[in-house]
């Protein structure tokens, strides 16, 4: 096996050598190929050395994509009824956006970002550090500032798209994953700070999950306070960590000094008893934050959205203020957070914008689809072809014309091939799950009437061309 990879490995080694040794003369790939006597395919790889999807990424294939589309169209429907509108921001941004927005000390920024130096292509262009977005809130707030969206009052925005984090892949955790998120942001005068906004977001999420048939969710709710509360909490945490920090993992030893709040992100089992004894943020909320949190809870009770209070929930991103939440789902195992979110009242200022309180969430779409798979198979939401059009010898053109007529009437049509014998057409029609097969022969075209067979019941009838769509639709 190792010797099979030799040409590519050698090419890579020589590539490194080339950089360190200026007298090295590069050899072309055919030279390697001839020397190693292994044929190289396009790109200089040994043919047969199959390229696979990168670790932590995956292909979404039919029929599974039907479930993804089902989820996306259901969420778009729900977002519409709450008057949310779509925003699409770029997949990569300046690295500084995430460093300043999400926080230098978070796992996301410190360990998980795909960052590269983007070289300039012309003297007029500057090289810059860019990053594949690990989340979309910072991008939305950047867009809010860049396009002065405060002129529109309260912005209710949603997005659906890929995010990238270099995490250890496991079930429900990927390096390219998908989020469905929403953000409510605007000047305080437009009501963006109101607890009514927090409650509306949470009630919308409950509606969305229920509508998708995911009923056994659990909403965990906390308030992480405002910057003043956080400073007092961080100080208390720092003091409480002082006597124990040396017994903790290296990450926690660093966090204890730089940003004690992030100690709550620790997953090391041995550290958990010490973390359990640390002070809770609920003890440090000022009057305004306490009242805000109580108002959110009162609305949730009134509209009938159940929740549990969890004062250890601080979330893994630094921008949160006041309300923070997660929805968990039992079927997901270790990665049980189906979505998370919260308020970020100071994020716009941190990114150089005007005050713009905001609240939002992101659903892990991969995890949402996983919990859905417990209940609905992709097959059950997939719309199968209504009809398989089977041309007899020499009838491809007539069949194409007929298929076009039927598709224009919104039927799903699978078009066969006139080299297929009738038996093979029947097999193909059954394989794609078509409801009917329609035979297109010379006589049928002349008579303007076609043999239409129901593949489940075996019933066959001759149907006039003009009646076909109505008959197939049933
Ligand atoms: P987050 O908690 O980092 O929040 O991510 C939200 C959700 O994305 C998680 O609950 C999880 O379902 C999913 N997720 C995160 N990482 C992965 C991964 N590696 N593989 C699969 N799914 C993953 C945010 O991203 C915030 N921007 C949410 C927000 C919006 N807060 C306010 N507005």
Image (tube, helix red, strand yellow):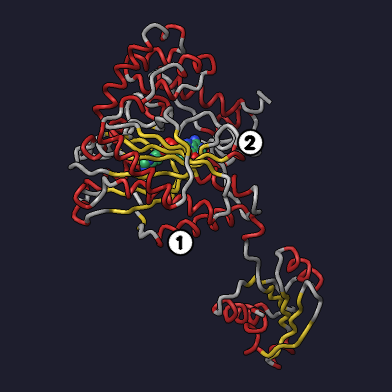
Query: In the image, which disc is placed on residue 462?
Result: none
Left or right: residue 97 compared with residue 13: left
Residue found at x 60% / y 34%: 333
Q: Image quadrant for the N terminus?
A: top right
- Identify the secondary structure beneath mark 2: loop
Disc 2 crowd rating (10 Å Cα; few below 14, some 14-19, many 20+) is few
Residue found at x 65% / y 69%: 385
Q: Residue 6, image x and y in percent? A: 61, 25
- Identify the secondary structure beneath mark 1: helix
Mark 2 and ligand 1: say if the CB distance to the nearest ligand atom is below 8 Å. no
Residue 177 visible (yes or no): no
**Pointers 2 and 1 in contact (C-beta within 8 Å):** no
| Residue at numbered disc 1 | 77
Q: Residue 282, image x and y in percent? A: 36, 28
What is the quadrant of residue 16 in the picture?
Answer: top left
| Residue at numbered disc 2 | 49
Q: Image quadrant for the C terminus?
A: bottom right
Residue found at x 35% / y 60%: 83
Residue found at x 80% / y 75%: 457
């Amino acid at each position: 096996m190792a010797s099979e990879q030799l040409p590519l490995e050698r090419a890579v080694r020589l590539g490194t050598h080339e950089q360190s040794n200026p007298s090295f003369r590069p050899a072309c790939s055919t030279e390697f190929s001839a020397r190693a006597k292994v044929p190289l395919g396009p790109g200089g790889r040994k043919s047969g050395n199959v390229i696979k999807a990168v670790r932590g990424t995956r292909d979404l294939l039919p029929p599974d994509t039907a479930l993804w589309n089902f989820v996306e169209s259901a969420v778009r429907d729900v977002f519409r009824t709450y008057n949310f509108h779509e925003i699409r921001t770029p997949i990569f941004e300046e690295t500084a956006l995430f460093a300043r927005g999400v926080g230098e000390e978070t796992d996301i920024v410190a360990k998980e970002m795909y960052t590269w130096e983007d070289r300039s292509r012309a003297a007029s262009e500057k090289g810059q550090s860019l990053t594949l977005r690990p989340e979309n809130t910072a991008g939305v707030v950047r867009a809010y500032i860049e396009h002065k969206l405060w002129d529109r009052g309260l912005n209710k925005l949603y997005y659906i798209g890929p995010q990238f984090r270099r995490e250890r892949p496991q079930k429900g955790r990927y390096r390219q994953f998908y989020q469905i998120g929403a953000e409510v942001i605007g000047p305080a005068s437009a009501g963006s700070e109101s607890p009514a906004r927090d409650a509306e977001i949470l009630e919308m999420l409950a509606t969305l999950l229920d509508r998708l048939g995911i009923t056994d969710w659990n909403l965990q709710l906390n308030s992480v306070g405002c910057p003043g509360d956080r400073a007092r909490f961080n100080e208390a945490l720092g003091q409480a960590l002082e006597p124990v920090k040396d017994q903790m993992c290296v990450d926690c030893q660093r966090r204890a000094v730089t940003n004690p709040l992030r100690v709550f992100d620790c997953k090391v089992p041995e550290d958990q008893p010490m973390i359990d004894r640390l002070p809770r943020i609920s003890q440090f909320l000022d009057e305004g934050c306490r009242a805000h949190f109580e108002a959110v809870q009162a609305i949730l009770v009134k509209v009938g959205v159940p929740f549990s209070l969890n004062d250890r929930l601080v979330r893994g991103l630094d921008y949160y203020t006041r309300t923070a939440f997660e929805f968990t789902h039992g079927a997901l195992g270790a990665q049980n957070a189906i979505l998370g979110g919260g308020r970020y009242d100071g994020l716009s200022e941190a990114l150089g914008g005007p005050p713009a309180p905001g609240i939002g969430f992101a659903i892990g779409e991969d995890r949402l689809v996983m919990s859905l798979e417990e209940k609905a198979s992709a097959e059950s939401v997939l719309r199968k072809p209504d009809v398989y059009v089977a041309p007899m010898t020499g009838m491809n053109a007539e069949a194409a014309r007929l298929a076009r007529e039927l598709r224009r009437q919104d039927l799903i049509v699978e078009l066969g091939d006139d080299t297929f014998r009738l038996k093979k057409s029947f097999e193909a029609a059954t394989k794609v799950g078509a409801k009917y097969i329609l035979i297109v022969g010379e006589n049928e075209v002349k008579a303007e009437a076609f043999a239409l067979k129901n593949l489940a019941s075996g019933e066959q009838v001759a149907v006039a061309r003009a009646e076909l769509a109505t008959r197939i639709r049933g």
